[in-house]
């Protein structure tokens, strides 16, 4: 049986990334796919990109990567863009927006946010009817399975059985109508506080853990066979990462430090 690790939303947090990669290696998993967002928030996007280049079989484009690395934005003075430099920016800009493969008879499709774009919001843990993000909310899980021009698909292409996406930083696995939707959560900036802002609330003790997904099955096979999907949560040295932030000149670092300690982006 083959095993594949799916990670996402590292956001410059090299400490968390190293912890997750060490955990993946301890399970003897060598195939890794990342769903995007390597930059912004954390202060080591250069180290993150270098590690992704070394470890990931496939790396997809995220919305933050698109903003920082897009050639049209080279005149803008983004801190992360300066930190990664032009060579890494060009490397990021050329990432694909989606990938798909068969595993144990299931067609699995992966992208950063949705088949419609890099910034759409769909969170099955909450009602999406009244969200106030960017006006790009997705209200039905069926929209996540659509064949769209954005991901290079036509209406005649096969519809996936399983869809994996990142962007919302909240890990989940949802099954409905013989379909499955999963989100590995965030390696670098988990966001799922049950009681936002109260770090002493015991119900929040798991919320700051990094997370990723393991897929188990026969990679590349269209024949139906045994398949499993598992969510993994692991701790990392948050204070070590905060020390990097405090020693940097990165803007908004105090806000990021709060996010790391509380798993709340408010």
Image: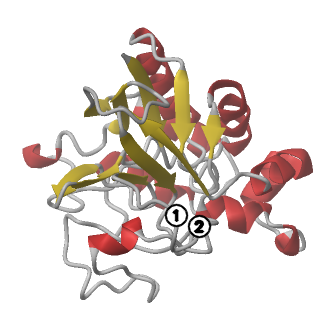
**Which residue occupies 62% across, 56% down?**
40
The residue that disc 2 covers is: 153
- Residue 221, given in percent of the width and then of the height, sits at 44, 30
Q: Which is nearer the eye, 229 or 184?
A: 229
Q: Residues within 10 Å of mark 2 (few under 14, many from 20)?
A: some
Q: Is residue 61 left or right of residue 29?
A: right
In the picture as drawn, the residue positioned furthest to the left comes out as 202
Q: Is residue 130 left or right of residue 254?
A: left
Asked whether disc 2 touches disc 1, contact meaning CB atoms under 8 Å apart, the reply is yes
- Residue 9, given in percent of the width and then of the height, sits at 50, 49
111 versus 151 height, above or below = above
- Residue 249, given in percent of the width and then of the height, sits at 70, 52
The residue that disc 1 covers is: 157
The secondary structure type at the circle numbered 2 is: loop
**Which residue occupies 66% across, 41% down?**
44
The secondary structure type at the circle numbered 1 is: loop
- Residue 137, given in percent of the width and then of the height, sits at 38, 81
Residue 205 visible here: yes
Q: Which is nearer the eye, 263 or 7?
A: 7
Q: Which is nearer the eye, 85 or 238?
A: 85
174 versus 19 height, above or below = below
Q: Which quadrant would the C terminus be assigned to in this image?
A: bottom left
Label 2, label 1: how many angstroms apart (C-alpha)?
6 Å
**Which residue occupies 46% across, 24% down?**
19
Q: Is residue 162 left or right of residue 204?
A: right
């Amino acid at each position: 049986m083959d095993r594949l690790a799916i990670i996402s939303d590292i956001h410059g947090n090299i400490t968390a990334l190293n912890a997750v990669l060490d955990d993946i290696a301890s399970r003897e998993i060598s195939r890794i796919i990342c769903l995007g967002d390597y930059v912004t928030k954390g202060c080591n996007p250069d180290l993150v990109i270098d590690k992704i280049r070394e470890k990931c079989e496939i790396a997809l484009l995220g919305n933050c990567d698109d903003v920082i690395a897009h050639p049209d934005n080279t005149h803008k003075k983004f801190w992360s863009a300066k930190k990664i430099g032009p060579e890494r920016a060009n490397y990021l800009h050329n990432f694909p927006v989606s990938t798909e493969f068969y595993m144990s008879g299931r067609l699995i499709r992966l992208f950063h946010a949705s088949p419609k774009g890099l910034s759409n919001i769909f969170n099955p843990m909450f009602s999406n009817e009244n969200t106030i993000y960017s006006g790009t909310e997705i209200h039905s899980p069926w929209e996540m399975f659509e064949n769209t021009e954005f991901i290079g698909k036509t209406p005649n292409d096969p519809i996936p059985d399983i869809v994996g996406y990142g962007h919302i930083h909240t890990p989940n696995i949802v099954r409905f109508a013989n379909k499955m939707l999963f989100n590995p959560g965030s390696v670098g900036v988990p966001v799922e506080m049950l009681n936002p802002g109260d770090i002493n609330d015991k119900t929040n003790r798991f919320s700051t853990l990094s997370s990723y997904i393991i897929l188990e099955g026969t990679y590349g096979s269209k024949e139906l066979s045994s398949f499993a999907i598992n969510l993994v949560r692991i701790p990392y040295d948050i204070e070590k990462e905060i020390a990097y932030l405090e020693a940097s000149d990165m803007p908004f670092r105090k806000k990021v430090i709060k996010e790391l300690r509380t798993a709340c982006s408010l």
